[in-house]
Image (spheres, rainbow, N blue to C red):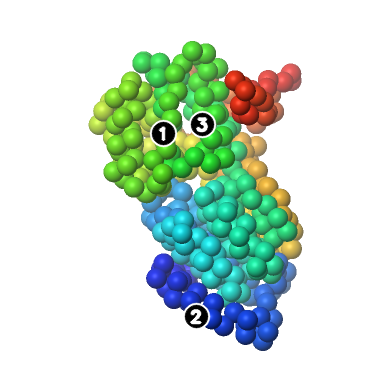
Amino acid sequence: MDRKYSRRQFIGFSSAALGSSLFLKACTNPASQTTSAGTNNFKVAIVLPGNITDRAWNQSGYEGITLTKQKLGAETSYVEKVGQPDQAEALSDFARRGYNLVFAHGGQFDAAVQQVAGQFPNTFFVAVNGAATGKNIAALRINHMQVSYLCGIIGASMTKSNQLAYLAGQSFEATTQELRGFELGAQSVKPNIKISSSFTGDWNDVAKAKEAALALIASGADVLYQWFDVASPAVLQTAAEKGVYAFGNTTDQLEIAPKAVLTSALKRLDLAIAYLAEQAKTGQLTGQKYLIGLEKPEIVSLGRFGTIVPEAIQTKALTAKAAIAGNKIQFESCQNGGKDTWCLKETAT
């Protein structure tokens, strides 16, 4: 059985542990940073910013450690709905209790991971969607730019107002890249298309997400690319109510609002998490960035197309998908308007 720790429980455990931390360091042997495949006490935990039933980001993370338990026989635990002020303590709590591998599920955990990792050299931390790396820190990244580029092609092909919008919980490297990919995809179809963006500051606040969606729709956007957790269905349903289009994110969200959802940016974090856990158990996980894109279609892909998407537009997106997977379309760092960003690079066969 997976062990669940509520926010109150992990704070309680941590308070007791803090008082005896020096004693524990002197009297116990720390857990191995990586555990060999033949060891039975491989312990994996995940710290989640939201609810494991959100049908989006947090659920994918929870399913990742569930799959890890099934595949590797690991002892697994999780804590959900951890706010930014409690991130470092949640990570530390699992490390103090001898977990070999701890996933921090979201780019917003980067600072907390960097703060904690040096104190617990025998625990390996994985910043999912993050940019942090170090001796015992790995970053697990989805190539958001690739799949959002495809959504940009679809959105630009479907819009009637020539205005698209991107909205998400927070602005950090992963969401910035996803927005840029969406822009580049849309501009490849319509160079002068308008793309707005909005960040609510909260991945789970339904009211804020709906308010942001309504504001973007009122400004003229008729295609919304959203990335939220618990708040995700509210945006998709708002799009349906207002007669505009939207994209699902992380999981296939077509069924949430079939009249609005064009397709979904699939990111099988469960498979990616289980893969890195296997690397850790066999001692092969290192402090680097693991970037996974369309070259691994079992992890990153497009979801089902809505019936509202014409076959010709589906074919256009799938042709671009094959070009990206075959490295004929790439993204490279560049400067645009004096700012660092990413630009499209098309290569020969």
Q: Which of marks 3 and 1 is in front?
A: 1
The relative height of residue 20 versus residue 346 in the rendered view (above or below) is below
As helix, strand or loop, the secondary structure at mark 2 comes to: helix
Mark 2 Cα shell of 10 Å, populated few (<14), some (14-19), many (≥20)? few
Q: In the depicted view, which residue is nearer to us: 53 or 88?
A: 88
| Residue 288 x %, y % | 71, 50
- Mark 3 and mark 1 in contact? Answer it, CB < 8 Å: no
Q: In the depicted view, which residue is nearer to us: 57 or 287?
A: 287
> Quick check: 98 left or right of 193?
right
> Quick check: 234 left or right of 225?
left
The relative height of residue 221 versus residue 273 in the rendered view (above or below) is above
At a point 58% along the width and 52% down the height, the residue shown is 110
* Residue furthest left as drawn: 241
Residue type, mark 1 in image:
Ser
Residue type, mark 2 in image:
Ala
Residue type, mark 3 in image:
Leu
> Which of the two discs, 3 and 2, labels the residue nearer the N terminus?
2
As helix, strand or loop, the secondary structure at mark 3 comes to: helix
Marker disc for residue 16 = 2
On the image, numbered disc 1 is attached to which residue?
Answer: 198
As helix, strand or loop, the secondary structure at mark 1 comes to: strand
On the image, numbered disc 3 is attached to which residue?
Answer: 179
Quarter containing the C terminus: top right
The relative height of residue 127 versus residue 206 in the rendered view (above or below) is below
At a point 53% along the width and 41% down the height, the residue shown is 172
Mark 3 → mark 1, Cα distance in angstroms: 10 Å
Mark 1 Cα shell of 10 Å, populated few (<14), some (14-19), many (≥20)? some
Mark 1 → mark 2, Cα distance in angstroms: 41 Å
- Mark 1 and mark 2 in contact? Answer it, CB < 8 Å: no
* Residue furthest front as drawn: 338
At a point 29% along the width and 43% down the height, the residue shown is 207
